[in-house]
Amino acid sequence: MKVCVDELRERYPVITGHRGFQERYPENTIVSFAAAVEAGADVIEMDVHLTRDGVPVVIHDETVDRTTDGRGRVGDMLLKEIRELDAGRWFGPQFAAERVPTLQEVLDRFGGRVVLNIEIKAYDESGPAVRGRVEREVVRMVAEKEIVGGVLISSFDANILKRAGRMTGAPALALISKVAFDEETLEACRRLGVFSFHPRFDVTTGALVRAMHGAGIQVYAFGADSADRIGRLAALGADGVIAKNPRQARRRWPKEARGTSPI
Ligand code: G3P
Ligand code: CA
């Protein structure tokens, strides 16, 4: 049975593995995603950029500098060049076999087994030649794999979500935010018809959670890993957390505290 985004409404708390199992494994690699699934994550989160030859690859930064042994902008490199890089050794010698995964590899390996939160990292500043290409490729690949129901496309950029949402066979959407919540954000979420809203921990408030819930939108916050922060999210009424250590996040989530904070 394939997993389904809608079923997340029935789960509590919803635990997402940020970049896989970022605390213990090299982020956004196959080994990191496998570890997050093994740890019982409901969702795995990943970041996607397009190579120069138009292939979606799973990597966080705009350049390969921090998380591989190479240098350069992902968008300036061919897939072949990126695949030659080591994406694990920077984190530990035991991970030397890891490569920058293509999105296709991740879909083949994990699609349907766990909900995939695919964050699109191409921003409008990328210019008209690139605009729309990433989301088009992601939507096409997810549809081809027949896992539309098990995918969330997320982005800080509402325009990316707007374009993705208009495409035939688009998966569910999620808006990410690191700025103070306001009515405009709620309106944007409503207009986009997002499934969930992903605020950074420090801008997550009870008012935000209540407003989103009033609109039928789930709230999964990121940037909260300590027991204190996770406890606070539960007290604010959040539905889940996007955590660097999904196993620990589940253990730290105090189930009895749902929505008890008046703030
Ligand atoms: O999903 C939320 C989070 O991943 C956004 O921030 O920079 O870690 O991609 P970042
Ligand atoms: Ca991300």
Image (cartoon, grey):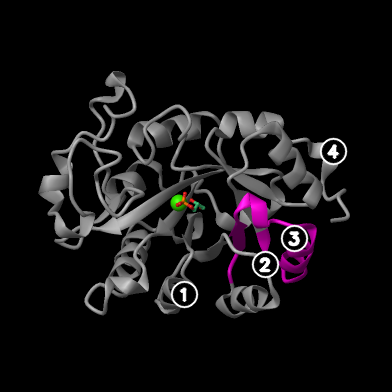
Helix, strand or loop under label 2: loop
Marks 3 and 2, how far apart at CA: 10 Å
- Which quadrant holds residue 192? bottom right
Residue at point 48% right, 61% down?
Answer: 154
Q: Which mark lies nearer to you, 3 or 2?
A: 2
Q: Which mark lies nearer to you, 4 or 2?
A: 2
Residue 55 image point, x, y percent: 21, 58
Q: Earlier in the sequence, mark 3 or mark 2?
A: 2
Q: Amino acid at mark 1?
A: Gly
In this figure, which residue is indicated by the disc labeled 2?
Answer: 181
Residue at point 26% right, 51% down?
Answer: 63
Along the line of sight, which residue is nearer the eye, 74 or 160?
A: 74
Q: Earlier in the sequence, mark 1 or mark 2?
A: 1
Q: How many marks?
A: 4
**Mark carried by residue 256:** 4
Residue 190 left/right relative to 207: left
Range of magenta residues: 194-218
Residue 126 image point, x, y percent: 28, 71
Along the line of sight, which residue is nearer the eye, 213 or 180?
A: 180
Marks 1 and 4, how far apart at CA: 36 Å
Q: Is residue 226 above or below residue 131?
A: above
Marks 4 and 2, how far apart at CA: 26 Å
Q: Is residue 217 magenta?
A: yes
In this figure, which residue is indicated by the disc labeled 1?
Answer: 165
* Quarter of the figure with the C terminus: bottom right
Q: Which mark lies nearer to you, 3 or 1?
A: 3
Q: Residues within 10 Å of mark 3 (few under 14, many from 20)?
A: many
In this figure, which residue is indicated by the disc labeled 3?
Answer: 209
Q: Is residue 221 above or below residue 210?
A: above
Q: Amino acid at mark 2?
A: Phe
Residue 8 seen in the current view: no
